[in-house]
Amino acid sequence: MVEAEHPDLVVMDIRLPGMDGLEAMSKVLEKHPRMPVVLNSAYSSYHENFMSWAADAYVVKSADTDELRARVRELLQSRSEA
Amino acid sequence: MEPAQLGATSRIEAFLPGSAVDVLRVLGAWTVPFVMVDAADNVLFWNRGAARLYGIAENGAVGRNFTEVVGETSASPHFTVQGISTRRYEAAHRAPEGGDLPVMVTRTELQAPDGTTGALILVTDLTESKALERRLARRVAQLSVIREIAECLQSEMSLERILRSILVGATASQGLRFNRAYLLLVNEQRRTLEGRDGIGPVDADEAERIWSRLAQKDRTLRELMDEYEPIAEGALSAAQRTARRLTVSLDDTDRFLIWALSASATVHVERGKVASGAGPGPSPLVEILGVETFVVVPLKAADRPVGLLIADNAITKRAITPEDVDMLELLGLQAGHAIERTRLTDEIAREVAFLEAATLEIRKNQERLVQAERLSAIGEMAARVAHEIRNPLVAIGGFARSLLQRTPHPDETTRESLEVIVDEVRRLESIVGEVLDFSRQVPPRIGSLDLARLAREAGDLLRFELEQAGVRWEVDADERLPAAAADRDQIFQALVNVLRNAIHAEGGRAVGPGPGDRPRARGRGQRHRGGHAPRGPRARVRAVLHHETHGLRPGAHHRRADRARPPWRAEAGQSRGRGNHGNVPPSRGGGSRCPRSWSLRTRRTCACSTSRISSGTDTRW
């Protein structure tokens, strides 16, 4: 999907069907090291897993998407400034 | 009574036919005391042996009454030798130098053909055999004493009681009867020969008082030993204080006591000098004991010196005989083994106590692990439930918001309903969050904590898993690391979590440059950066955990991490590889690329105050 769509930023869950989200993130970053990645999971415990620290942000899943929007906006802004 | 006028030869000839004169000549020269008497017990024949035994010449005995000549007294009951008119009995005769002469008298009645009666008397000097008997009896009595003392020592388990029993055995009238005795024991830890105990009167007056009192109460040696009560340090007797003064260093090999200890043989000091002439002068010991004649017996167990037993007769001045020394050596032999036995028993007791404590600790750790597993399972279940609930809530709330935002002019009821849905979803999310937080947070219970030891315990707890995962756990702690004020269980849980992280991270796919460079987790305890031992409320103990893992996917990125749960703060995942020691190449947001050959090193720090905890948003304590 990343290869095909060339997104500016990736928001991904950790529990994915068929693949571990952290492993998927690793694959993305391997090919696109500058890609901003936001982990969005209903599990708050992965926040403490050092493997998730490679992401630019970790937002716990919620019906209120304000925080997620804010982090995405922030990352896109800093990317455009860089 | 007038001695008989008849010549002995003519009268005896009446009894002895043929060459009786020749026989008499032989008997006369015989050294065995041989006497002939007539019916009235007057001496007819008195040989050389009799003359020598009684110191009375023939002409002084012949014709006189035998009993009178020999001064016979204290005759034992006679017994008759079967078939012959012979009687045998013990008696006390008069010794030539005065005093009693113990003898065995064998008297055979004779009758001449003409009916004249008389008797042949054979006398056996029992002086030597009586002396041997007395010596034997004395020795048996002494060995009985040693046996009784040995039995007492074998039944005792307390070192203090054993020492006291040895001293009582050496000095009691029922024991070896020395006036005073002292015990010194080797102390390997302090490298000294220590004077432990002493017994005996300080002078003749005290001796009189003590011995009179003891004589009034008829007690056995065992009863005397059992009377021992521990004495407080401030109430020592003179003998005990003297014993304390005898302490010397084991390294002072030129001292008399150390020489006696290493000589492994009894030393008899007479008139201030070693009887054998060997070894250094005993003058210092003579001065302390206040006596010039004493015996020093080494105490050994399996050829290892255990201590010394010193004994003297300072009060009665009775000479110390070789027999006394023999008995003291026998006592010393028993004493050495008894003392060694208590030492080994105490050592075993200490080891057992240590093992019991270790077993208890292991059991507690197991319970903690089970509890941790249980809590972990609960936490995991809570997380899973939260996940299962959150996802549908996201969908419900998300679509409700979307409808609110996208419906241009919703009617009041629809709007209110959607707002209720949004509010309720928000409330449920909040409740789920609070439940998860509650299940994780535990109020800290602050106590004094040995961080280094705790780190080792965490490693011990997960040793098997670490080994299975090929992770090496090292604890490098400053020796002077002071205790930290922290919650033991939380710190322990944090340590276990970090180790589990390492275990799961490696999880069978650890790859490294070589077997000598395995992934490792390392805990380090440091004192305050000032280099001095922390003191006061500002002092801190800093614990730093490093986790190194190899073989991350090439290009894996890492950033400065958010803060982890207290008490740990997760710091930047800094890459450090060959040729790059600490310099993080500039990149977006401070991150860096991690080539395949590089290691990811994560670090978590916990700073714990030694005496005060400051709380707040900062996770440092």
Image (spheres, rainbow, N blue to C red):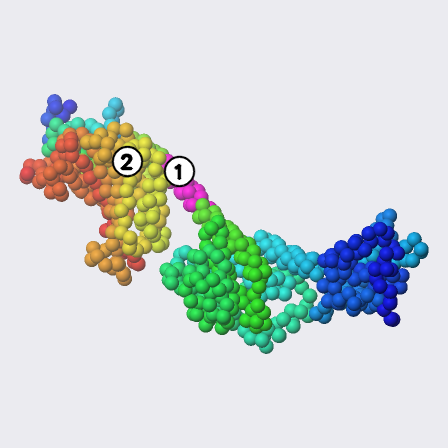
Q: Residue furthest left?
A: A81
The mark closer to the camera, 1 or 2, is: 2
N-terminal-most mark, 1 or 2: 1
Span highlighted in magenta in the image: B356-377
Callout 2: chain: B
Up-down relation of residue B32 to residue B573 (above or below)? below
Q: Is residue B534 magenta?
A: no
As for residue B359 lying within the magenta part, the answer is yes
Dot 2 alpha-carbon crowd within 10 angstroms: few under 14, some 14 to 19, many 20 or more? many
Circle 1 packing at 10 Å, graded few (<14), some (14-19), many (20+), is few
| Rendering coords of residue B470 (x, y %) | 28, 33
Quick one: which residue is furthest to the right in this view?
A: B114
Left-right relation of B320 to B408: right
Q: Which residue is mark 2?
A: B471
Residue B355 in sight from this viewpoint: yes
Q: Secondary structure at mark 1?
A: helix
Q: Residue most toward the bottom?
A: B205
Residue B334 figure quarter: bottom right
Q: In the displayed structure, would residue B495 be above or below residue B184? A: above
Instruction: Please provide percent x and percent y for residue B389.
Output: 32, 33
- In this rendering, the answer to whether A25 lies above or below B573 is above
**Viewer-nearest residue: B369 or A67:** B369
